Image (cartoon, helix red, strand yellow):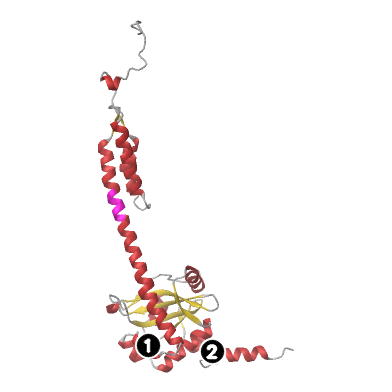
Amino acid sequence: MNLDPNAQDLHYDPYVEGHSDLPPRTSILAVFSAVIPVACCIPGIGILAMLMAAMSLSFISRSHGRLSGRGAAGFGIVLGLIVTVLQGAIVFGGLQGWKYYTRVMVGTTDTFIVALDQGDFTTARSMLSADADSDLTDERLQEFVDTLRQVHGPVTGATTDFEFIGNAFASAYDSSRQNSGYNVSSNNEPFIPVALATDRGAGVLVYVGFDENSLATTSPLIIDLAVFAGTNEIMTLREDGPARDIAFALGGEHITLEEARGGGLPAGDADADSESESDEPGF
């Protein structure tokens, strides 16, 4: 035992003994847990806030009064929980939207394009709105698919492959584009961008117009197509349909199927003409 009354007790804790006049410090972790959920745009920030709040409560309970901040830590837990729930709802909604886009919109476009390519106009027509079906003749459908082949090569269908999607947008848009929006509409009918894959390994960007009243179903009806035939050049399925407005809204130039084929070659003859030219002897 130390008998010197002036000696310092190394084990003396003024907070435990209750003889200190020093105010308790506020837990920095508790403060951070209440502040960082404000940056709710950062994924997982709510979970981090709740972890920091729980740690600060643990430190406060073991500090024997040296730390304060239970209120801030409790606020951090509540706010972190709210942010986590909101972020979870946004992620869930995004996944559901992507699921609807890939399965319904891309799936519908894929079935329609494949049916056209195979000459199955009965199936293709069953996927058109009443106005589009009455406006399009079999000859126009055949001319459209022939032109699509001649401009881009054989199309294998719609795709969600990010490489094809990136190639499609890169080939369609350039710095002169006035409007590069991902979702445009004509008379409240939405036109959704979809990428088509070709056997050349390239992507083709097409804006697919869907009948607004059929979007709530698993088989939405197509009203028109706007296909990029080249940089700033857009051809449409219907000669004078709503996709013409979309071409102008995108800052592009609407061209006829004849113009897309390169100045008047009949549908189905462009490839044969190019092959015959390549066979000519050089001089």
Q: Is residue 271 above or below residue 216?
A: below
Q: Main secondary structure of the magenta part?
A: helix
Quadrant of the frame with the N terminus: top left
Q: Which residue is mark 1?
A: 123
Residue type, mark 2 in image = Gly
Say what secondary structure mark 1 lies in.
helix
Question: Does 84 lie within the magenta span?
Answer: yes
Residue type, mark 1 in image = Thr
The numbered mark, 2 or 1, whose residue comes first in the sequence reads: 1
- Crowd rating for badge 1 (residues with CA inside 10 Å; few <14, some 14–19, many 20+): some
In this orientation, does residue 91 appear? yes
Residue shown at the point (40%, 79%) measured from the top left:
109
Q: Is residue 50 above or below residue 9?
A: below
The answer to whether marks 2 and 1 mark residues whose Cβ atoms lie closer than 8 Å is no
User: Where residue 160 is drawn, which disc sits there?
Assistant: none
Quadrant of the frame with the C terminus: bottom right
Q: Nearer the viewer, residue 212 or 83?
A: 83
* Residue 267 placement, left or right of 28: right
Percent position of residue 266, x then y: 52, 93
Percent position of residue 71, x then y: 25, 38
Q: Nearer the viewer, residue 37 or 228?
A: 37
